[in-house]
Every structure is written in structure tokens, then in C-alpha cells.
Image: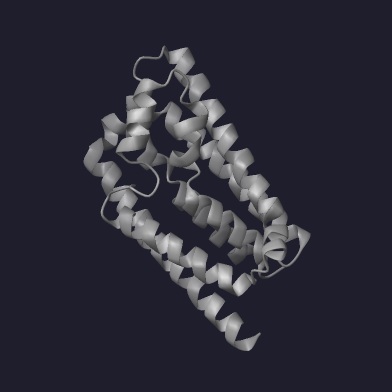
Amino acid sequence: MTDLVPFSLITLTSVLFIVDPIAAIPTYLVITRNETPAHRRSTALRACVAMTILLIVFAAIGRYIFQALGITLPAFRVAGGLILWLVALDMLRGERSTQEGRPELAEGETKEDVALTPLAIPILAGPGAISTALVLTGQAESWVHRLIVYGAIVITGLISYVSLLLGERLVFRLGQTGIRVLTRIMGLLLAAVATQFVLSGIRDAMTG
């Protein structure tokens, strides 16, 4: 039981920071600017539900993917850590080019329904989030650890929904500068998590 608390904290922070719903707010407001308040709330809800389901599915089948492709967990830890590093570097610059760029923004401005794409995928659940879910469940040692991963994904989905609902207020209170500062702080912490993934993968490969 002693390892459940640190595992829970690392899992929740890893998933929440990689999804980073606060940083997604400006794009969400842009691509839903022509929607009514009720339609905007519906878009946010469907996007967060889709993101949650997607990450849980990948978390649930992660072990089978590894087995089918013959990939060892240490190798995927290193690969996942490197992907997180790229995302973290983007966040340290106050950017999200690995999750949302001009193509996603342009697509969102022209689509009538943006909940599934590009809002849920890839703005909220991008390659980094999927990789994180796979790595976390891959290193889960018991069903309790796996439930913690699923719980962290659900909590992240709820926080993302609330963040998008409060998007206009948060932008008004924080401003673009405040959002970038929060993104950079999350990027710094995410870089530490990514480094831990890589070091754990290397250590397990050398001892395994």
C-alpha cells in the first residue's frame, strides 16, 4: 500500500499535465466562437467524454499491444519518455505544436462539429497523452494500480470539462500571459516525469 500514494500522484500529474486543458482553452474558444452557449457546453462535454474513453481504451489494451508487437515495457518507457520530452519542451516555450497547430485550428474553424476532432483528438488526447496512458498501465503491477490509472484519466476528463466551461472566465482572469506561465510550469514538471520514464526504462533494460 505504501507505493500507491506516490504512484497515484505521478499518474494523475502525468495524465493531467500532458492533456493540459488550461492551455487548450484559447483554441477551444476560437473553434466554438460561432456556437451558442448551450451548444458550446455540449461540445465540451462530448470532447472530454471522447478523450476519456479513448485514453481508457488505450490504457486497457496497452499490454496486449506490447505483446502483439513484441515490444518490451522498458523500450516503450524510453520511447514514451522521449515523446513526453518533446511535448514538455513545447510547453516550456508556451506552445502546443505537438497537439495543436495551424492545421487543427483551420480544421476547427471550418467544421460544424469540432467535439471529436480536432478538440478531443488531438488537442486534448494527442500522441503524448496516449503514450502516457500506455506506459502507466504497462508499469501497473496490480489491478489496483490499473484502477488508479483509469481513475486519473476520469479525473482529468472532469477537470478538462470544468476548465473548458470556465474558459472565458479563466482567459479573462489569467490572460494569455497567465495561461502561458501555467503551461510552462506544467511543462517543467512534465519534463521531470519524462526523465523518470527514460531513466526507469534504461534501468529496467539493464537489469532485466
Residue 8 image-quadrant placement: bottom right
Residue at image point 59% right, 33% down: 49
**To which quarter of the image does residue 133 belong?**
bottom right
137 on left or right of 43: right
The mark total stands at: 0
Query: In the picture, residue 54 is in which quadrant?
Result: top right
Observer-nearest of 71 and 88 = 71
Against 105, residue 151 (above or below) is below
Q: Residue at x 32, y 26 (%)?
A: 30
- Give above or below for 153 relative to 45: below
Which residue appears at 35% of the width and 14% of the height?
34
Left or right of 43, for residue 104: left
Q: Is residue 162 visible?
A: no
- The percent position of residue 140, horizontal first and vertical second, equals 69, 64
| Rendered-image quadrant of the C terminus | bottom right
- Seen at 43% across and 40% down, the residue is 123
Establish if 176 lies above or below 207: above
Which image quarter holds the N terminus? bottom right
Pick whichever, 48 or 102, lies toward us: 102
* Residue 144 screen position, x and y as percent: 75, 59
Q: In the image, residue 161 lies at what x, y percent?
A: 50, 32
Q: Is residue 39 left or right of residue 86?
A: right
- Viewed as shown, does residue 13 lie left or right of 136? left
**Extreme-bottom residue of the structure:** 207
Seen as rendered, the residue at the extreme left is 177
Q: Nearer the viewer, residue 55 or 113?
A: 113
Residue 195 can be seen, yes or no: yes
Farthest residue in the right direction?
Answer: 143
* Coloring scheme used: one colour
Q: Where is residue 119 drawn, in percent x and y?
A: 45, 33
